[in-house]
């Protein structure tokens, strides 16, 4: 890597921080199973839930159909886990995979795990019941339904969304998410964890 790359990434990170502050909006609704205590998604008095797209954001499907973590994804999830920051998935799957999010999530796990490669499996347990999938084909992203359902389930916590496509970043931002486009050259692969901790404390 050229010596100029690190300063460039640093300045862009700072610009992203400024954008985070400008984009932040209060999340409304009653708490529903999301922690708001010290060490859980932020210090006492604040919390944030980090949602992701799945394909090409956290996992990559190769030409041979094998599936693996995107570079840095496993380490990033471990960092969030270590700070007790809740994570979730907002991802398109066929609505025919089940009548509930739990049923569709179970089928998604089978599909991913069947072709998974790598020394450690995908960290499904980190996501719990925070896996939101379309109930109908009309709910598929970029329709707003999945983001709205996830936000409502997050109670009073701030919501963050990370995806690799500009379209989804813009759509989620319009719905009150603090959005970050993942996997861009010369930018941090994911929104830095200290930024997320700070987001949880925004007024």
Image (cartoon, rainbow, N blue to C red):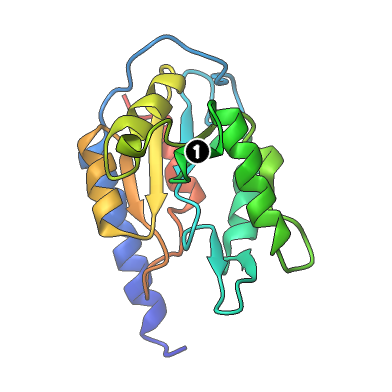
Q: Is residue 177 visible?
A: yes
User: Could you tell me how many numbered marks the image carries?
Assistant: 1
Q: Is residue 29 above or below residue 198?
A: above
Q: For this rendering, which residue is in front, 182 or 19?
A: 182
Residue at x-position 47% and y-position 63% = 56
Q: 50 left or right of 149?
A: right
Determine whether the residue tagged by mark 1 lies in a helix, strand or loop.
helix
Residue at (79, 66) in percent of width and height? 119
> Between 145 and 81, which is closer to the camera in this rendering?
145
Measured as percent of width and height from the top left, residue 155 is found at: 43, 17
Question: 86 above or below 194?
Answer: above
Which class describes the residues within 10 Å of circle 1: few (<14), some (14-19), or many (20+)? few
- Horizontal side of 127 relative to 178 (left or right) equals right
- Quarter of the image for residue 61 reads bottom right
Q: Is residue 85 visible?
A: no
Q: Which residue is at the far top?
A: 30
Q: Residue at x 36, y 85 (%)?
A: 4
* Residue 132 spot, x, y in % from top left: 48, 34
The residue where tag 1 is placed is: 96
Extreme-bottom residue of the structure: 2
Q: Position of residue 11 (x, y in %)?
A: 30, 66
Task: Please tell me in which quadrant of the rendered image residue 126 appears.
Answer: top right
- x%, y% of residue 146? 37, 33
Identify which residue is drawn at 64% across, 55% down. Answer: 112
Q: In the figure, is residue 202 to the left or right of 154?
A: left
**Please, which residue is most extreme toward the right here?**
119
Q: What is the quadrant of the C terminus in the image?
A: top left
**Front residue (pair 135, 144):** 135
Q: Quadrant of residue 76?
A: bottom right
């Amino acid at each position: 890597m050229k010596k100029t790359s690190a300063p460039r990434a640093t300045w862009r990170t700072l610009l992203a921080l400024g954008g985070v502050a400008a984009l932040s909006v209060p999340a409304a609704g009653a708490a529903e199973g999301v922690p708001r205590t010290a060490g859980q998604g932020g210090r006492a008095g604040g919390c944030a839930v980090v949602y992701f797209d799945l394909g090409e954001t956290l996992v990559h499907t190769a030409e041979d159909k094998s599936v693996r973590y995107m570079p840095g994804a496993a380490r990033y999830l471990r960092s969030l886990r270590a700070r007790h920051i809740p994570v979730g998935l907002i991802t398109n799957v066929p609505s025919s995979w089940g009548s509930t999010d739990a049923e569709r999530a179970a089928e998604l796990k089978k599909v991913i795990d069947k072709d998974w490669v790598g020394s450690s499996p995908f960290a499904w347990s980190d996501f719990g019941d925070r896996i939101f999938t379309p109930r109908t084909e009309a709910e598929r992203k970029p329709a707003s339904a999945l983001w709205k359902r996830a936000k409502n389930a997050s109670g009073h916590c701030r919501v963050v969304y990370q995806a690799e496509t500009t379209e989804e970043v813009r759509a989620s931002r319009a719905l009150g998410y603090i959005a970050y486009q993942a996997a861009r050259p010369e930018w941090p692969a994911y929104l830095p964890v200290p930024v997320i901790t700070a987001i949880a404390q925004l007024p």
